[in-house]
Image: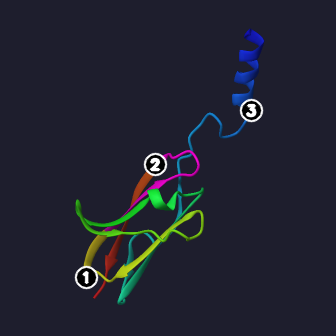
Amino acid sequence: MILGVLRLMLLLCVTPGVAEARILQLRESSPAAEAVVAGDNVQYVVRFDGLVDHAASRLEIIDGSAVVLSLVPVLDSEPDVLAASAPALPPGQYQLRWIAKSRPDGEVSSGLIPFTVGQ
């Protein structure tokens, strides 16, 4: 019995990812932080360092603390990417808020990317 418990503890210590949740880290985004965007349609792309559950993740455009636009991520995008597009917003300063659920463990990460919509 004790030997079995010790083996299990050893297995958990040497098997990567078994005992810890996967927090997604932002690798790159479009728009990049502090970027100025223009045009009739804006592409929002957030790339992570791990796999994303597209259906359970969200992208939102916020102005201050108010959600201006909820975006629906493309479900068949790359496995480490959340992507969506939307018509251009009125000129001003905004933030792209990402809320990403990792696969396969379901850990939720979030962050903000400030950007400006130009004239």
- The quadrant in which residue 95 appears is bottom left
- Tell me what residue is drawn at x 30 percent, y 84 percent: 118
- The quadrant in which residue 49 appears is bottom right
Say the numbered circle drawn on residue 14: 3
Dot 3 amino acid type: Val
> Which numbered disc flags the more N-terminal residue, 3 or 1?
3
Q: Nearer the viewer, residue 3 or 111?
A: 3
Dot 2 amino acid type: Val
Q: Is 96 inside the magenta-drawn segment? A: yes
**SS at badge 3:** helix
Distance of label 3 from label 1 (alpha carbons): 52 Å
How many residues crowd around disc 3 within 10 Å: few (fewer than 14), some, or many (20 or more)?
Answer: few
Which region is colored magenta?
Answer: 95-108
Q: Position of residue 39 (x, y in %)?
A: 36, 89
- Tell me what residue is drawn at x 60 percent, y 64 percent: 79
Q: Position of residue 103 (x, y in %)?
A: 57, 52
Residue at label 2?
Answer: 108
Q: Is 66 inside the magenta-drawn segment? A: no
How many residues crowd around disc 2 within 10 Å: few (fewer than 14), some, or many (20 or more)?
Answer: some
Q: Position of residue 55 (x, y in %)?
A: 47, 60
Dot 1 amino acid type: Pro
Residue 4 vs 68, above or below: the answer is: above
User: Badges 2 and 3: C-beta atoms under 8 Å apart?
Assistant: no
Residue at label 1?
Answer: 91
Say the numbered circle drawn on residue 25: none
- Tell me what residue is drawn at x 23 percent, y 63 percent: 64
- Tell me what residue is drawn at x 53 percent, y 54 percent: 25
Tell me the quarter of the image containing the N terminus: top right
Q: Is residue 115 visible?
A: yes
Q: Position of residue 14 (x, y in %)?
A: 74, 32
